[in-house]
Image: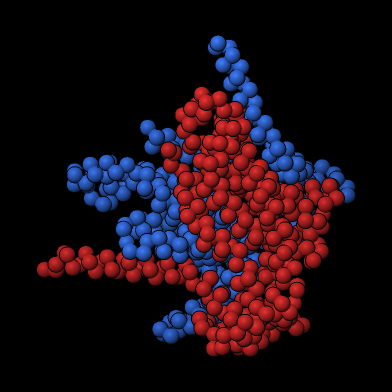
Amino acid sequence: MRSPKISRKTAKYALWAFIFASALLFLLPTVLTIANSFMTSGEISANYGALFGKMTDDKKVFISENVNLKFIPDKVTFDQYKAVLITNSDYLMKFWNSVILTVPITVFQLAVAILTSYGFARYPGKIKSIIFFAYIILMIMPYQVTLVPNFLVADKFGILNTRAAVILPAVFSPFSIFLLTKVMKRIPISYVEAAKLDGAGELQILTKIYLPLCKSAIISVAMLVFIDYWNMVEQPLVLMNDQDYHPLSVFLSQINTGDIGLAFAVGTVYMVPTILMFLYGEDYLVEGIATSGGIKG
Amino acid sequence: MKRKQQCGKRRERIFSDICLIPSIIGVMIFFIVPFGIVIYYSMINNAIMKDFVGLENYSKLMENSAFLEAAKNTSIFSLTAVPLSVVLSMGLAMLLERNIPGKSIFRTFFLSPLMVPSASVVLVWQVLFHNHGTINQITEFFGGQGTDWMNSGKGQVVIVMMFLWKNLGYNMILFMSALCSIPKDIIEVADLEGAGRIWKFLHIKLRYLSPTILFVLILSLINSFKVFREVYLLTGDHPLAKLYMLQHFMNNTFNSFDYQKLSAAAVLFALVMIVIIAVLLIAENIFGKDVEN
């Protein structure tokens, strides 16, 4: 007869090992990108040459046939970073393009969303729930559906090929409204009643009760919106012809043979803002996601 | 006295209505009105003649093999990836619910893909799934046969994995918080009455989790349409037939200026989405109320 105590203990260790292994797998692509950014360009060509090819006539010719995943570079070098950050100002320009697209989008989308969610949550009604339903439908539309309307509007207003063409529609994108309304609807009415007894007006109820109670949700939604637009590829490609306006994410999506050595370094540089945000804001993020869940109360 | 209160209430109501106005104006200008134009475009023959042709563009679309292939692939992808992400993230949440050492570090690890720009890590995915890439090397090392992931039907598996990698952490947090909010006394009573694990899961936990399940379903559905970006980054405009998604179709139609075809596709897509979301929301209402009582 096996001892139940021992088998339970082994099961526990096995479970822990399983969770540990899968957690590592989730972290792996990020770690690999960072580790590989310290390789010399020669090493990258040798290891990942098969990923990068030149189109000659109708066949793609690759630098080499091999793909070799490496965790630790043979020789640690900061050459790639030097090239990305100092030698060539192109990447920093594109990084800056990303910033001046993404930051206004995040700030203004959140501002609109806070007002709108308050409007939806404070006095719900039949008409409002119909509008809310329409917003959910809009939210779920992939960019490719909304891109055509966006393109038409930008063309009509004469803002095609400017940053406004990307920023303006994004500001009114309903994603954060969907999440914040859910959170705001769960604020107990008794809080509001108490504030009203103290003579608070509607604006004060919004700023003194709703905002502080939704703080972590707002921060977590802001992080999600930021990362979503930090990543965008399609919208700038369609709405801005001029490559000088393109964010780094578009460049990363088109990285080619000439820049192979820089690929991982650029990718890592591009991760820095989001990783910093994550390190400082993880608790908010978790709390914010948790409060946006489906369970009421 | 009573009248004054009602008066005050109306003023408050108006304030909350006013809050909606900026957003409604923006959504009108940037989404609704142009979408009306899209519907109009889907019913004319071309942008110059502007002859009304009714549903002709739609019937043409239904015969378009690229569209049908894309619609099929997208449905297959969503129907696999969305349920998988619900089940797996719920499972993960239940595993992490126990008090295991290092729980918060694991949580961070699972959540980290959310914070990494897909453009940054797409190279690593290419290395992993290349024909001579890491996964094939490992399989071959153990005597297995490698598969050409990106250039065969297996491509869909890769996309599903990327989707799960990106989204499991977020959904897991949602489930963890839902698990926390299950009243402890109910579980304790069930324990006292000698209920088994499976019984407890089916009759207690699943009931309390059902609103979260629906919420995760909606979110995963949205995110499943965002996976195009990863596919695009991995394979470009024209991937293999099996990876050709609706978004590729729309992107390419957009680039070839065939707005009539594109508009019809967009309207069809919107209609399907409206039906799906309506069903999910009605279900959420029914199940949500069930737990509240």
Front position in the image: A247 or A205? A205
Where residue A269 sits, quadrant-wise, is bottom right
Image coords of residue B143 (percent x, y): 41, 85
Image coords of residue A9 (percent x, y): 22, 66
Image coords of residue B102 (percent x, y): 36, 64
Image coords of residue B162 (percent x, y): 53, 65
- Decide if residue B198 is on the left or right side of residue A243: left
Front position in the image: A75 or A292? A75
Which chain identifier belongs to the red chain? A
- Decide if residue B33 is on the left or right side of residue A202: right
Where residue B55 sits, quadrant-wise, is top right
Q: Which residue is at a point 61% across and 17% down the rendered structure image? A: B7
Q: Is residue B78 above or below residue B131?
A: above
Q: Which residue is at a point 52% across and 26% down the rendered structure image? A: A198
- Decide if residue B70 is on the left or right side of residue A293: right
Q: Is residue A26 above or below residue B273?
A: below
Looking at the image, can residue A225 be seen?
yes
The colour one sees for chain B in the rendered image is blue
Q: Residue furthest front?
A: A198
Quadrant for the N terminus of chain A, please: bottom left
Q: Is residue B62 above or below residue B183?
A: below
Where residue A73 sits, quadrant-wise, is bottom right
Q: Residue furthest left?
A: A1
Q: Which residue is at a point 61% across and 53% down the rendered structure image? A: A225
Q: Is residue A57 above or below residue A26?
A: below
Q: Which residue is at a point 40% across and 52% down the rendered structure image? A: B176
Quadrant for the C terminus of chain A, please: top left
Looking at the image, can residue B32 be seen?
no
- Decide if residue A26 is on the left or right side of residue A130: left
